[in-house]
Image (cartoon, grey):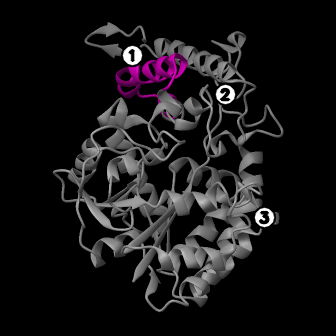
Amino acid sequence: MVSICMYFQVHQPFRLRKYSIFDIGTKKDYFNEKYNLKLNNEAILRKVSNKCYLPANKLMLKLLNENDFKISYSLSGMAIEQFEKYYPEVLNSFQELVDTKKVEILSETYYHSLSYLYSKEEFKEQIEMHKEKVKNVFGVNPKVFRNTELIYNNEIAKFVEDLGYEGILAEGWDYYLKWRSSNFLYKPKNCNIKLLMKNYKLSDDIAFRFGEKSWKEWPLTIEKFGQWVNAAEGECLNLFMDYETIGEHQWEETGIFEFFKKMPSEILKNPNNNFKTPSEIIKHYNPKDEIDVPNLMSWADVERDVSAWLGNKMQQEALAKIYSVEKLIKENSNKELLDAWRKMQTSDHFYYMCTKWFNDGDVHKYFNPYESPYEAFITYMNVLSDLNIRLKKEEVIIGGKKSKGY
């Protein structure tokens, strides 16, 4: 018997406006609400919502109501905020899905950040913020955690376990699995929290290769995919991907909606198959083995490491600088500055600075507002300079002395 565990990531960043050196000290509006008609945050959210979120949610609601079908989502705090601000109808449609009791909402960092790598205190605070937001919006308390970009190692698993979570998601990367299959439940080294590992081959067949006509398996029909599922050895087959796969990364013309429309009935033709949420996988199966992941792993590009965000000097400098002002920001009573600082932690800003080549689908560069990684870096550092000037003007008092920022 194979249990299909489907997880979708829903995230949209607050992208920065084009912010020049001449704006430093004069412009406080960092996020591109009105400066680029095609790539401002509201326009992008509406475009993706109309192509993906709304039609995909409509389809999923029908499938949930008509089949023994279950799915899970993680919605970043940034995505939820934009739904509330720009397109409440989309948030309502997600609430309808949760109301079926067949959908699990997972926990993550509120700002979709890399905070664990720089500030465990900030990491914990963002997790608590996200839990509170999910509780307020969906009325549920997440029990399973997924870190930004599935960034994971043994240390992160232990930290998350100590926060009270029952499960954590990670990439099922061969380097760490070795001879083992991702199609089982595991436990991290020296932890009791349960570990669900992505079957990246089958997940990426949908997320990256579905519409690729040069792929030897194209076209990927649901019948063919069903055969692959039936042939899979193991207990739980974890299909993890961005929700934007449906309709945005893979356009409707590729047949992606029809593929998902037929998925439950095709998979369930085999009476030994079923669909389960991550929490149900944890309750139903026992860990098969212990997985040791001492180094950082993610679900990004062929290396599955964190070099997509930390691979060059620009990214490293920007990240070091944004976290260097944490103490000053948090001792400041200005909530607007704190929110701007946290929005600037979102991983997308640093991905836009990436200079490496990706071989498995550069989907994170969708709606990149910059001409080059260097423009992304300059814009980011200009905004950060203005943020520091505002910190100085706030006259934060630390130990009886006026702060000078970083």
Which residue is drawn at the image coordinates 40% and 73% (left, top)?
A: 233
Which kind of residue does numbered mark 2 sit on? Asp
In percent of width and height, residue 105 lies at: 45, 65
Q: Which residue is denoted by mark 2 in the rendering?
A: 29
Is residue 93 depicted above or below 8 in this figure? below
Residue 254, numbered circle: 3
Q: Position of residue 368 (x, y in %)?
A: 70, 36
Upstream in sequence: badge 3 or badge 2: 2
Q: Is residue 71 visible?
A: yes
* Mark toward the viewer: 3 or 2: 3
Tags 1 and 2 touching, CB below 8 Å: no
Q: Earlier in the sequence, mark 1 or mark 2?
A: 2
Q: Residue 394 versus residue 372: which sits nearer the camera?
A: 372
Q: Secondary structure at mark 3?
A: helix
Q: Main secondary structure of the magenta part?
A: helix
Element at label 1: loop
What is the C-alpha distance between the residues marked 1 and 2?
A: 21 Å
Residue type at the position of mark 3: Thr
Left or right: 86, with 63 as reference point: right
Q: Which residues are magenta?
A: 311-339
